[in-house]
Image (cartoon, rainbow, N blue to C red):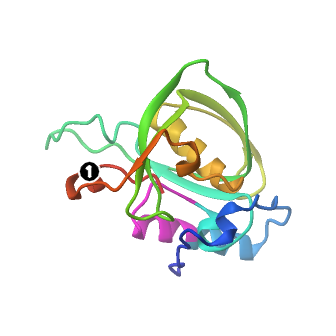
Amino acid sequence: MALLPIVNLPDPILRRKAKPITKFDKDLQTLIDNMIDTMRDAPGVGLAAPQINVSQQLAVIEYAEDEDDEEENEDTPAKPKKLYVIINPEIVKVSEEKVMGIEGCLSIPGLQGEVERYEAIQVKALNRHGSPVKLKVDGWMARIFQHEIDHLNGVLFTDLATRVWKPSADEADDVDLD
């Protein structure tokens, strides 16, 4: 597969609402595979189509639920990462509880911000083959989904952050949503 260039601010595509996907053809499957490879290579835990200069309602997310909570232990196998492909996603339900967290973005290199997000959400979307899916996610996974869905609506984490800063070298290794 091909690695795709990731666009950065101030590219105007990052500020546009992406178009819904209606054709589930071979070209879409190739785009999805290329986005997954690009996300993994970056490395990130999510990538939205506008970040690779494609104005379509498509995002890929890959994360292991307990990735940050697990202590290093040779006897404990690493939790497998779960891959999500969401097309035309819509957040249909949110928790009352919100939490603050630190986010970064592949399209805004060198900056991090503190963003308040819903602790849990329910998302309605289509999978890579056009079948409807309903996902309930919480914690860090809910944060990733909200971040990627914001990208599809032209919203960046810096728009929502209460504070934005340039991280030190060790901080930069800790956070990268997409």
Using the image as rendered, state which of residue 25 and residue 40 is in the foreground: 40
Amino acid under label 1? Glu
At x 55% / y 19%, what residue is drawn?
97
Which residue is at the far left?
74
> Crowdedness of circle 1 by 10 Å Cα count: few (<14), some, many (20+)?
few
Residue 150 shown left or right of residue 140 in the figure: right
Which residue carries the number 1 mark?
171
For residue 129, which quarter of the picture? bottom right
Give the magenta part as a residue range.
Answer: 35-47
Which residue is at the far top?
96
x and y, in percent, of residue 133 in the image: 72, 41
Using the image as rendered, state which of residue 67 and residue 7 is in the foreground: 7
Vertical placement of residue 13 versus 61, above or below: below
The count of marks equals: 1
Vertical placement of residue 115 versus 105, above or below: above
x and y, in percent, of residue 85 in the image: 62, 54
x and y, in percent, of residue 142 in the image: 54, 36
For residue 51, which quarter of the picture? bottom right
Residue 92 shown left or right of residue 71 in the figure: right
At x 59% / y 53%, what residue is drawn?
156
Is 41 a magenta residue? yes
Is 118 a magenta residue? no
Using the image as rendered, state which of residue 164 and residue 123 is in the foreground: 164
x and y, in percent, of residue 137 in the image: 56, 33
Vertical placement of residue 53 versus 44, above or below: below
At x 35% / y 50%, what residue is drawn?
175
At x 61% / y 18%, what residue is drawn?
96
For residue 94, which quarter of the picture? top right
Q: Secondary structure at mark 1?
A: helix
